[in-house]
Amino acid sequence: MLAMVVPAILISAILGGVVSSLQNSEALSLSYSFGASFSVWLISVLVGIIGVVLFESAAMGYLTGDETETFKFEDAFVAFKQGNTWLVAALYAAFMDLISFIFGALFVAAVGVISASFVPQAFGFNTTTAQIIALIIVGIVILALVGIAWIFVATGLAFIYLTYFDAKRKGQELHLMAGFSKSWNLMNGKRWDLIGLKLLTLIIAVVTLAIIAVVGALLWWIFASMLTWTVFAIVLEAVLAVLAVAISIFYTVWFAMANIKFYEEIK
């Protein structure tokens, strides 16, 4: 089960490293080129989409494995075996990127309104105290509305990949964007349950990782600083790095299975 998500993690990490190198090279370039910047941005978007498709394919494999009670490594690539499911998943990921961009732009606009209220002269405005307060209130209201709308939309579209795959493997005739409508209808009245699940898993993960980080830092300080065991310190760092990777894989699988169980319960 744990091995099923490893390809997605490795490929995403490798491609992410390539994108990071390209971004660093572009940032260090003395001359600005719109074409180069756009190319790097486009590559980063494509890499993100590839990562989403791989992780969602693994999630589809977990759904299949949970139903058959048999988790097979090859099921991590089930999206690539189920007709054009992988292509639909890539299209869905692109749409979700677009939706995220729109909400991100609205968020930046709201923050801009709030920022302008604190330093109106910098933006060429001559405002009274009442107008400044009004701008702050408007900005906060816009920010709150954008946040609420984003949560509403994100939870409603949380299962666009699984609903499409689930229906497709059962032989149902689907139009291209069927996952969006199916997920939206599925999540009616279930949004708060999903939010609670996300918060619970996030809290557990943060607390666990914080404990490991504190213990690791303490051990490193004891053996590397107090006893000056340089070789041991290097080995300890390597062990902690491996442990961190193992825990990341475990939590990735745990989050995925939590979503699968939730999906199976509400569908």
Image (tube, grey):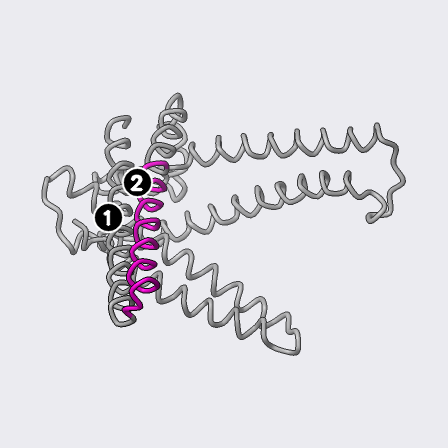
Q: Amino acid at mark 1?
A: Phe
For the point 41% across and 56% down, the residue is: 49
Q: Which residue is mark 1?
A: 250
The region drawn magenta spans 203-229
Q: Nearer the viewer, mark 2 or mark 1?
A: 1
Q: Looking at the image, is mark 2 or mark 1 earlier in the sequence?
A: 2
Q: Which residue is mark 2?
A: 162
Q: Quick one: label 2, few (<14), some, or many (20+) residues within 10 Å?
A: many
**Horizontal and vertical percent position of residue 85:** 30, 50
Q: Secondary structure at mark 1?
A: helix
**Horizontal and vertical percent position of residue 40:** 52, 68
Q: CA distance from mark 2 to mark 1?
A: 21 Å
**Horizontal and vertical percent position of residue 231:** 26, 72
Closer to the camera in the image, 170 or 215? 215
Q: Amino acid at mark 2?
A: Leu
Q: Quick one: label 1, few (<14), some, or many (20+) residues within 10 Å?
A: some
Up/down of 236 relative to 195, above or below: below
